[in-house]
């Protein structure tokens, strides 16, 4: 009887290449995502490292077709495990967002960008946890509804509702100059 593909030992070189490509493609966005959950960039890096360690333990054939949602799910679960362990509150970290490099901007443009980012962060923190998470996954991490469903366990209908109500709430609480940006993106 033939051995099923998922139980075969894969070529170590192809596994290594698969993991390397996953790290290259997803590491920085996963760190950003984990940092929004953990409020700590260094801890986010540790969680993402653990996520990739877990990927190394998987058969590439088992996760290849759903790699992105698999990575986000493992990253989210590891981050939430850490929060439960340390009993930290989930929030966006303004100091993390302030570290985003914008080398193409002049100093005055960078200051304005940082101010807008700070005000957007404050507004996002006023949403419910679920609204904030699905908005971040959709618009910052560029995940599809199906991928968000895999990560959060929410139904696509619930995701759509949370995004709709979250964006509506953001339009109500954002300053006028930021509100026009949200109105054009949805």
Image (spheres, rainbow, N blue to C red):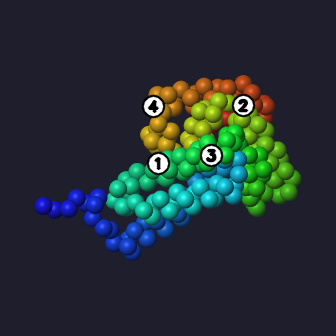
| Residue in the image at 40% along x and 68% along y | 15
Circle nearer the N terminus (3, 4): 3
Residue 143 or 153: which is nearer the viewer? 153
Q: Is mark 2 on a helix, strand or loop?
A: loop
Q: In which image quadrant can residue 16 be found? A: bottom left
- The disc placed on residue 146 is none
Measure how far apart labels 1 and 3 are at the Cα level: 24 Å
Q: Is mark 4 on a helix, strand or loop?
A: loop
Tell me, yes or no, whether the two marked residues, 4 and 1, touch with CB atoms within 8 Å: no
- The disc placed on residue 85 is 3
Residue 96 place in picture, x, y as percent? 74, 51
Q: Residues within 10 Å of mark 2 (few under 14, many from 20)?
A: some
Measure how far apart labels 2 and 4 are at the Cα level: 23 Å
Circle nearer the N terminus (4, 1): 1
Circle nearer the N terminus (2, 4): 2
Residue 181 place in picture, x, y as percent? 70, 37
| Residue in the image at 75% along x and 31% along y | 174
Q: Residues within 10 Å of mark 4 (few under 14, many from 20)?
A: some
Q: Name the residue under label 4.
A: 155
Compared across the picture, whether 58 is left or right of 176 comes to: left
Residue 84 place in picture, x, y as percent? 61, 42
Q: Mark 1 points at which residue?
A: 69
């Amino acid at each position: 009887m033939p051995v099923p593909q998922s139980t075969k030992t894969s070529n170590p070189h192809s596994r290594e290449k698969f993991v390397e490509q996953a790290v290259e493609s997803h590491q920085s966005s996963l760190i950003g995502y984990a940092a929004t959950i953990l409020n700590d960039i260094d801890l986010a890096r540790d969680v993402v490292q653990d996520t990739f360690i877990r990927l190394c333990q998987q058969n590439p054939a088992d996760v290849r077709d759903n790699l992105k949602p698999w990575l986000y799910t493992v990253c989210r679960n590891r981050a939430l495990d850490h929060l439960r362990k340390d009993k930290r509150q989930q929030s966006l970290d303004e100091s993390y967002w302030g570290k985003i490099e914008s080398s193409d901007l002049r100093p005055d443009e960078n200051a304005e960008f940082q101010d807008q980012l700070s005000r957007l962060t404050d507004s996002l923190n006023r949403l419910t946890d679920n609204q904030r998470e699905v908005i971040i996954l959709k618009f910052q991490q560029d995940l599809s509804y199906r991928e968000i469903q895999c990560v959060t366990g929410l139904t696509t209908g619930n995701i759509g509702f949370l995004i709709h109500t979250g964006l509506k709430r953001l339009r109500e609480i954002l300053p006028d100059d930021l509100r026009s940006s949200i109105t054009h993106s949805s």
